[in-house]
Image (cartoon, rainbow, N blue to C red):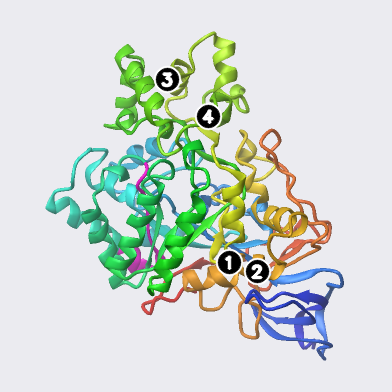
Amino acid sequence: MPDHDLMLRNGRVIDGSGAPGRRADVAIAGDRIAAIGEGLPGSASRVIDADGLVVAPGFIDIKTHSDFTLPINPKAESKLRQGVTTELIGHCGFSVAPVLPGKVDLLRDYLSPSAPWLPFREMGFAEYLDSFPATAVNAGMLVGHNTLRLMAMGMDQRAPTEGEMAHMAAMLEDGLQAGALGLSSGLFTSPGSYASRDEMVALCEVVRRHRGGYFTHIRDESNGVLEAVDEAIDIARTCRIPVEIVHFKTSGMDNWGKAAVALERMAHARAEGLAVNCDSHPYTAGSNPLKNLMPQWVQAGGVEAMLARLPLPETRARIREDIARDGLNNWGRIPDWDCVQVSISPHLPQHCGKTIATLARERGADPIDVVCDYLVEDRGATRVLVISIAEEDIRAIVCCPDALVGSDGNCVATYGITSQGMPHPRFYGTFPRVISRYVGEQRLLPLETAIRKMTGATARALGLRDRGTLAPGQRADVVLFDPDDFRDQATYDDPHRYPTGARTTVLVNGTVVIDHAVHTGALPGRVLRRAADGSVG
């Protein structure tokens, strides 16, 4: 009988701790790493020649929305080919559970720009975790604040009653008891934007009792970004819980250059003993439902109410005035409407890839009128890319050793239902882009630091007890890649492209899922749950 199931021979092992890489073998038995060392003795059922390859922990994508696609694309190709083996889902206040009786259509309509293909059904959070399908990646889930608000009080623009607040807290408690890793918020858009500090503190006190985390799309990533960062830090200080500022950016021309200031505020918070982290992706464009670019009052009352008011001349005049004064909601001022590109459009797929400026020229209409008409024609379900971030701010975040890496992307593929539309290239390229562009080409940081930001540091932020580093006894989530042949190829005009890497091999829980750039079809991923002590496994 062989001594081990797998032996990775002669690779450059970068263990995720930030330590220098070293030449070594990695022995794997079952779903665990058995030994690491140079010239390990013993036989294995399979030996993989890793000479010339980096052997690293599987990358942990701390910020994703793959809950919208994993049930219909369980092979998770776009992530695995980047080396991602674990994802955290349910972000920005958008979770697909809990769904109370009679509320399925409400949540489906609300999430239509983000999850146009996902079937929804009534279920509690425990059922959601228990029934999650087999997938090729590990997944940890968050309870979304926007979803809680929808279930308790719909899209009402007001403070919750005492009963509604208790209802939200009870639903959150159920999710945390079932194993959710924490609470997510999307304070940038309705109904999350209607929540006061007191509402979020009350919910985060529930999170504290269960030793979970708080993951926030902050209230403003543009003109009020520094104040919004301060609000997140205040939650960490008040509730004494870990806080993750997700897909951190300083958006809009008036805010370019502010990333360093915000990062310094987070560093001061950590020096104070607060567990405050952030993550980001290395692209100058973000992505959002088109409706979220409009002033917040446009969405008041829900999708049907929005669609009814958009054709009104007085609505459009007010939108035009608000955008001229403040820029796009949560995005700030952009150079022009060529910076907004249709990404996914379920009812008007022929326009995917066109910018609002292009549509305005084609229709001979004002861009604001085009946006309003398009939202009506596409039933509010349009998703867009928005170029609004300065490269200097991206570099500042990439260089920060405490800023983690998150794609803010879904698991998609070059075939099937998830190949539709023109998604953000980060879905396919985030992790190799950091390595090829910022480590390889620009030499802004060493490879060991970049990998730590994607693995060990992320695992620590999430409380993962046996993932994120390569060491005996750890789960065998491993990526092997050639650092000279591991480049993102996805672009805004041609996003459905996997990264290069003919020798890229990925293991999830000891099972080979990507074998020399070919998906094996294996689905060894697990649902990760938070334990009573706060650890996740």
Q: Are the residues at dot 1 and dot 2 in contact (C-beta closer than 8 Å)?
A: yes
Would you name the residue on which mark 3 appears? 372
The residues tagged by marks 4 and 1 sit, at their Cα atoms, a distance apart of 39 Å
Please state which amino acid type lies under the numbered disc 2. Thr
Residue 328 in percent (x, y) is at 43, 32
Would you name the residue on which mark 1 appears? 401
**490 up-or-down from 209: above or below:** above
Please state which amino acid type lies under the numbered disc 3. Cys
Q: Which residues are magenta?
A: 174-188
Quadrant of the image for the N terminus? Answer: bottom right
**Which dot, 1 or 3, sits closer to the camera?**
1
Residue 100 in percent (x, y) is at 29, 48
**Which dot, 3 or 4, sits closer to the camera?**
3
Residue beneath the point at 27% across and 38% down: 155
Q: Earlier in the sequence, mark 1 or mark 2?
A: 1
Please state which amino acid type lies under the numbered disc 1. Pro
Callout 4: few (<14), some (14-19), or many (20+) C-alpha neighbours within 10 Å?
A: many
Asked where in the image residue 379 lies, by quadrant, the reply is top left
Residue closest to the far top: 364
Would you name the residue on which mark 2 appears? 449
Would you name the residue on which mark 4 appears? 346
The residues tagged by marks 2 and 3 sit, at their Cα atoms, a distance apart of 45 Å
Asked where in the image residue 387 lies, by quadrant, the reply is top right
Q: How many marks?
A: 4
On the question of residue 73 being in view, the answer is no
Residue beneath the point at 40% across and 26% down: 323
The residues tagged by marks 1 and 3 sit, at their Cα atoms, a distance apart of 42 Å
Q: Are the residues at dot 2 and dot 3 in contact (C-beta closer than 8 Å)?
A: no
